Image (tube, rainbow, N blue to C red):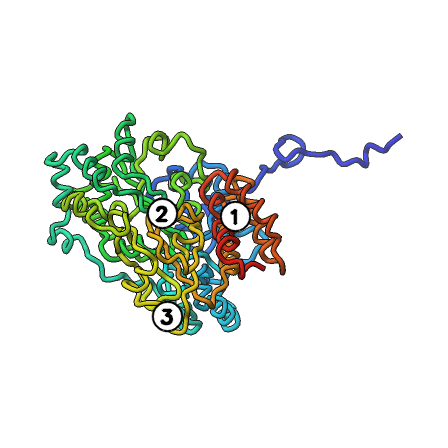
């Protein structure tokens, strides 16, 4: 017979009575709780503020400890698992496990996207890794929207571009802070006739139908990449039962794109006026601006200028909400952006329903990018005929091109829609860099494919490049020379998409990873890569997976000599 006296009785941790009970799960740390309470102050504890509060912790302590996450979850009345899954989704949050060391106090992020890699990012990473002290961490990062000044690095809330190892290390050592550009502020903008149109709208001198007619006649389209007609979008949102909202996508993350940054650094109120007019036209109660975390100086500008709109009576206090991204390219997709604004992981939604029907917080939502709203004032005041009087090669209107790579004068170029890449290079960019021969170009950033120099007379506009398997998208034009292998470019792009995939759907999540593995082989399995590409294009939920292999397909089609 067994000796029952020697058997240890099991005590459930939550039971009382026999033995001391202890609560289950990770317990709230009093010190961490006090720190979170001090950090949040009187800020709202609403669910959609989660990412904003995570930023507060990251900025203050340099990481997100488990104790701080537990305290935040308790304060916001959320499950710890929910807070954790959001925090770990975004690249700019350093989430620590119990046995992990805190990251060094300073992090240097080095952009390794196409243009930066072309202009020395790998050499820069090597030098920084060799020379950085123990209290400096050097990591890779995707495009930072500074392609015209490549290579670029980010240190805390400041950016160095173009960067060298010496300038980056000096900035890291001296704790450099972002300096504001010389922009047109509220007073200067108003003095030059700014907000006159908005006043006309608010006083009912203008009507929404009048503005929509002008937008329709001008042919203005969404200039973030999708190209949906602006006037039609306003009509659709207005047709939905209120209350309605507006969301502005200022999270341009497409490698090669930096036009929205330029607009906001130069003339932010022209964008803000267009935004307020759009909100007025669709009767949006609140406006949410979703801004790239890589643009800290713009955040400072908007935090400084939006209160001036409120003081002038142009926006009700608290109506315009500025929300900060956290390093997730996928949040440039409109529905993923809405999820992020709501304080969730940036997972794209299935469509339909479309955001114009059920968008932010379940309400009909008008979504625009920065450039589209920037043109509203000029279009209405100057008339549709002014806009459609621009254009070349059968296209009408103006486009803003972000040009980088092997040109003498990279940067933002406002030019005729339908301009060819040859005309763009020669008339706006000072020609190809000395010592280089034009080889090819990306007409629409990472997802727009690659075309050879022999096709330099194709108009750059919506609908002109699709027949070649390419897209203009956000008009991020990257110029390549004979020194650049398009095979290496395709690999760079797919590494980017692999890193930025949200992981929601298998074709994109596994497809990008597999494509990178295949491209890293000494010899490419062309038939398998083509089969993989077809599956990703057909079955991915959103445009990231659907367009991820456009560059690779272009290499197969137009650059056979670069195929391994």
- Disc 1 vs disc 2: Cβ atoms closer than 8 Å? no
223 vs 217, nearest the viewer: 217
Residue positioned most to the right = 1
Q: Distance between the residues labelled 1 and 2?
A: 51 Å
Describe the element under mark 1 as helix, strand or loop: helix
Tag of residue 447: none
Q: Which residue bears the numbered disc 2?
A: 464
Taking the image as drawn, is residue 35 in sight?
no
Q: Quadrant of residue 217?
A: top left
**Residue drawn 45% across and 33% down?**
350
Q: Which residue bears the numbered disc 1?
A: 66
Residue 253 x %, y %: 40, 51
Query: Which marked residue is nearer to the observer: mark 1 or mark 3?
Result: 3
**Residue drawn 52% across and 69% down?**
126
Q: Distance between the residues labelled 1 and 3?
A: 51 Å
101 vs 555, nearest the viewer: 555
Instruction: Identify the image quadrant of the C terminus.
Output: bottom right
Answer with mark 3 or mark 2, whichever residue precedes in sequence: 3
Answer with mark 1 or mark 2, whichever residue precedes in sequence: 1
Answer with mark 1 or mark 3, whichever residue precedes in sequence: 1
- Disc 1 vs disc 3: Cβ atoms closer than 8 Å? no
476 vs 553, nearest the viewer: 553
Taking the image as drawn, is residue 448 in sight?
yes
Residue 451 x %, y %: 43, 55
Residue 96 relative to residue 205: left or right: right
Q: Which residue bears the numbered disc 3?
A: 433
Q: How far apart are marks 3 and 2 (CA)?
A: 27 Å
Query: Which marked residue is nearer to the observer: mark 1 or mark 2?
Result: 2
Q: Is residue 194 above or below residue 168?
A: above
Query: Mark 3, residues whose alpha carbon is within 10 Å: few (<14), some, or many (≥20)?
Result: some
**Residue drawn 60% across and 53% down?**
518
Residue 202 relative to residue 435: left or right: left
């Amino acid at each position: 017979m067994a000796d029952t006296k020697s058997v240890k009785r099991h005590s459930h941790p939550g039971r009382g009575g026999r033995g001391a009970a202890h609560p289950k799960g990770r317990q709230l740390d009093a010190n961490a709780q006090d720190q979170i309470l001090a950090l949040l102050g009187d800020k709202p504890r609403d669910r959609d503020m989660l990412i904003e509060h995570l930023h507060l912790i990251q900025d203050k302590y340099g990481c997100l400890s488990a104790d701080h996450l537990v305290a935040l979850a308790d304060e916001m009345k959320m499950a710890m698992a929910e807070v954790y899954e959001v925090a770990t989704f975004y690249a700019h949050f350093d989430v620590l496990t119990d046995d992990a060391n805190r990251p060094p106090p300073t992090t240097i992020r080095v952009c390794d996207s196409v243009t930066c890699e072309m202009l020395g990012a790998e050499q820069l990473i090597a030098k920084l890794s060799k020379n950085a002290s123990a209290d400096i961490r050097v990591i890779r990062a995707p495009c930072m929207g500074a392609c015209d000044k490549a290579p670029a690095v980010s240190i805390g809330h400041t950016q160095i571009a173009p960067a060298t190892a010496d300038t980056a290390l000096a900035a890291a050592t001296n704790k450099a802070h972002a300096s504001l550009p010389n922009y047109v502020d509220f007073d200067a903008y108003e003095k030059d006739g700014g907000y006159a149109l908005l006043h006309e709208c608010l006083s009912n001198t203008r009507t929404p139908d009048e503005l929509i007619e002008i937008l329709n006649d001008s042919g203005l389209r969404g200039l973030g990449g999708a190209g949906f007609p602006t006037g039609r979008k306003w009509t659709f949102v207005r047709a939905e039962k209120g209350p309605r909202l507006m969301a502005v996508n200022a999270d341009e993350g497409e490698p090669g794109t930096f036009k929205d940054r330029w607009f906001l650094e130069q003339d932010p109120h022209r964008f803000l006026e267009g935004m307020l007019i759009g909100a007025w036209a669709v009767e949006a109660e609140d406006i949410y601006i979703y801004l790239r975390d890589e643009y800290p100086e713009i955040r400072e500008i908007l935090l400084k200028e939006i209160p001036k709109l409120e003081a002038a009576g142009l926006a009700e206090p608290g109506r315009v909400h500025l929300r900060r991204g956290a390093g997730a390219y996928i949040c440039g997709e409109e529905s993923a952006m809405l999820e992020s604004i709501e304080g969730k992981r940036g997972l794209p939604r299935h469509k339909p329903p479309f955001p114009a029907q059920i968008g932010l917080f379940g309400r009909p939502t008008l979504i625009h990018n920065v450039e589209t709203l920037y043109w509203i004032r000029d279009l209405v005041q100057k008339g549709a005929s002014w806009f459609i009087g621009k254009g070349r090669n059968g296209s009408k209107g103006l486009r803003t091109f972000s040009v980088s790579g092997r040109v003498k004068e990279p940067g933002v170029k406002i030019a005729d829609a339908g301009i060819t890449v040859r005309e763009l290079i020669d008339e706006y960019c000072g020609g190809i860099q000395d010592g280089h021969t034009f080889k090819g170009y990306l007409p629409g950033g990472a997802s727009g494919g690659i075309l050879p120099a022999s096709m330099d007379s194709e108009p750059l506009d919506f609908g002109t490049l699709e027949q070649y398997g390419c897209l203009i998208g956000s008009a991020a034009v990257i110029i390549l020379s004979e020194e650049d292998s398009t095979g290496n470019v395709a690999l760079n792009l797919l590494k980017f998409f692999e890193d930025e995939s949200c992981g929601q759907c298998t074709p994109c999540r596994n497809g990008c990873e597999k494509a990178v593995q295949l491209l890293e082989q000494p010899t490419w399995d062309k038939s398998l890569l083509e089969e993989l590409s077809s599956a990703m294009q057909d079955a991915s939920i959103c445009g990231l997976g659907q367009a991820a292999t456009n560059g690779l397909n272009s290499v197969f089609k137009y650059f056979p000599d670069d195929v391994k």
